[in-house]
Amino acid sequence: MSSTVDSTTTPPAAPRADSGRADEATPSLVDAPASRSSAGTGGGAGAYGDAGTDGDAGPANSTAPHPARAALLVLADGRFPAGGHAHSGGAEAAVAAGRITDAATLEAYCRGRLHTAGLTAAGLAAAAAAGMDPLLVDEAADARTPVPALRTTARRLGRQMMRAARAAWPSPALDALAAARPRGAHQPVVLGVVARAAGLTPHDAAHIAAYESVGGPATAAVRLLGLDPFQATAVLAGLVPELDRVAAQAAEAAGRARTEGIGALPAASGPLADIAAERHAAWSVRLFAS
């Protein structure tokens, strides 16, 4: 990916046997929660709708608000206590290696991350939000996360998001996933189940995951480099058209996965970022957890 993160797409490996899957039956993991609105969600089981749309009810020129759009803002807010503030999305290692030095190189790094890790995470989140078995999606997440450091990070963030989400949007589906994955499911999978519980669409979930993939590094760069926060915000604003396309691509893939199988989900990766994550995890002193 550009000069900062290798964006080589690699096929998913076989699911890992240590994913922590429980032996109990799992139908309740995909039951539609009672808190979902009956109109305008577009993401329930059997009611996915057109992939790549926002699922709003009513005609295109309707001014009626999305019934759960505020939940999207809450989940995407960096102040939501899901633990993301402690992670740099690989930016700390990239800064140390000289791959991020200013706003221009930050933009290149974020663009590469968006189209690799961001796309993959968005697809996983959209699939879980669409009602696919979250344990199956979690196994797919393991297969798409080849290095132990990033698997550990993803499950730690998933566990933290689960704690916050169960307080905000109590749901039997969240309770079941927490019981089945006591060590934590991958964060994008938890995000998708949370989005579904909050009444959001798969496309909404994809948007949040895609935004998180670049929002974390941009925020971290301000602290790591003393970068002007206005410049960091301008980087994110400049990526908006690509972020929209990635979210739509991920939501479309999730729609296909419901009929074609889990292999239809994106499996893009950045080998250089994976290597950097393993090295970063071994640092004795670091500002961010990952």
Image (cartoon, grey):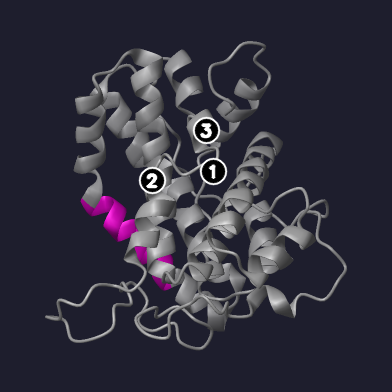
Report the residue marked by disc 2.
Answer: 77
In the image, the segment drawn in magenta is 241-252
Viewer-side label of 3, 2: 2
Report the residue marked by disc 1.
Answer: 82
What separation in Å lies between label 3 and label 2 (alpha carbons)? 25 Å
Query: What's the residue at 37%, 39% (across, down)?
Result: 215
Percent from the top left, x then y, of residue 238? 19, 41
Q: Amino acid at mark 3?
A: Ala
Horizontal side, residue 46 vs residue 109: left or right: right
Quadrant showing the N terminus: top left
Residue 124 occupies which quadrant of the picture? bottom right
Q: Residue lying farthest left?
A: 61
What separation in Å lies between label 1 and label 2 (alpha carbons)? 10 Å
Task: Tell me which numbered mark, 3 or 2, is placed earlier along the sequence.
Answer: 2
The total of numbered circles placed on residues is 3
Q: Residue lying farthest top?
A: 285
Q: Amino acid at mark 2?
A: Asp
Q: Amino acid at mark 1?
A: Ala
Q: Is residue 198 above or below residue 4?
A: below
